[in-house]
Amino acid sequence: MPRDAAAPVVACGQIKERTITTRALALVIAGTAWLLVAGTPAAPDAATESELQSAVFRAKPAVVMIMVRIGATATVRCSDGSTAVVRPGSIGELGSGSIIHPDGWIVTNGHVVQPYQEGADGAFAAELLENAVASACAAELDGLSGAMHTQRIRALAASPENRGGLALERTLQVHLSNGKSYPAEVKFYSPPAYVVVATATDASGISRTEHGRDVAILKIEDKELPVVRLARHSTDLHLGQALFVIGYPGVVVSHELLSRATQYEPSITTGRISGFKEDIGGQRVLQTDRKAGVTPKGDSMFTRLWNHGVDLYIRDLHYRAYRNMSAANRIHPGFPDVERVREDCDIKHKEQGYLHREEYQWALMGTLLLGGIAGVWFGGRWVMVATRQHLRSIIREELDARNGSARR
């Protein structure tokens, strides 16, 4: 939970987008949450509008869309001995993540990449195989009642021969809001909390189960990426505190009336913290993980330029904000918020009168400063010359007076 504003911003969410079943589901942090922009524990309404706007702006470029796609080629043998090679389409999983290190380390929920990790043992593989069976053995299945139809498909799909004939094609992609996409590698994975990952017996003989932590760490190859800072403890939050959730709701991602050009730009949902719960593994739902083999680093050249530009923009210092945004844009071009704020700075700067423009004010201050230095320099020299002449006249008069006394 970073310390950049008074209201936390949480990047989260999962969307199941199935090209076969056309089902979409958005979830808000199941198991593990990462608080991207969290502030000091102040009153819920203590943050000003500009502080909240700044918090959201800072976090958005580092929120990414994670896409898992599972396809397959199945060699299916039906009950009559006939075989067919079928491509049953693909199933997609969409989720949200956050860049926590400028070298491309990303944290997300374990359930987002669960289908990718499970592979042939997962629910997606079973669904693809059943769809392949339904297509290849359609003649055998025609005329069966609903229940019998389903049972026959599952029986055929469960046969070792058909299970062995399924070849999966898995892809894991990370999409930034500037439109760039990267293949990703899973560096650490812990399944959702309902999955039992270990069972141990303590000294008293009581058997205890360890549940998944529902967290995953991904790696993409790039440098100086926008990042967020994670706070140390979720206990800094309090009931009623304003909350911003940044992610990719299914309606926003898949709606046919929305432009595809903005599909990778995360959406923002507002709310308040209404309670603190624990999952079935005894973990608080709002928490961070520090056991994933990577130390978060909430800083990069892009982030420094972007965050400073946001600060200047909020303070209406448009000229310097524009320069910072432009420098950030040269590192990683195309982020919608960078382009949007930069364009707004340029417009507002040009609308200002010359005397209110920062560069003219700096030029005027520089001119006055140089003039003052020059005045001090030349004025000081005149004073020194005048003082020297005055001292000389005093000394000359004193010497003349002494010479006159000596003659007498």
Image (tube, grey):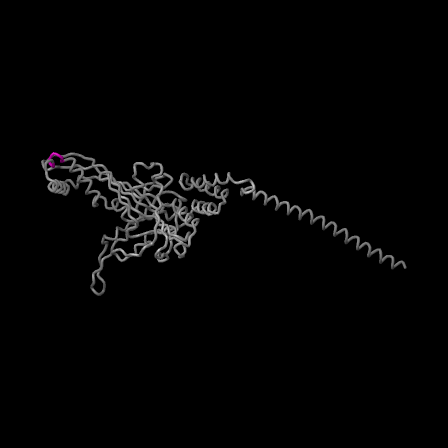
> Relative to 124, is 176 on the left or the right?
right
As drawn, 209 above or below 139: below
Tell me: 234 left or right of 396.
Answer: left
Outermost residue toward the right in this view = 408
- Dividing the picture into quarters, in which one does residue 40 lie? bottom left
Residue interval drawn in magenta: 137-141
Q: Is residue 70 visible?
A: no
Q: Residue at x 56, y 42 (%)?
A: 355
Residue 144: percent from left, percent from top: 10, 38
Rendered location of residue 121, percent (x, y)? 20, 45
Instruction: Give the camera-side residue of 345 and 294.
Output: 345
The quadrant of the picture occupied by the C terminus is bottom right
Give 150 or 330, whichever is nearer the viewer.
150
Residue sitting at 49 percent across and 43 percent down? 318
Query: Where is residue 114 drawn, in percent x and y?
Result: 26, 47
Q: At x 38% / y 45%, what residue is drawn?
A: 60
Our reading of the magenta stretch's main secondary structure is helix
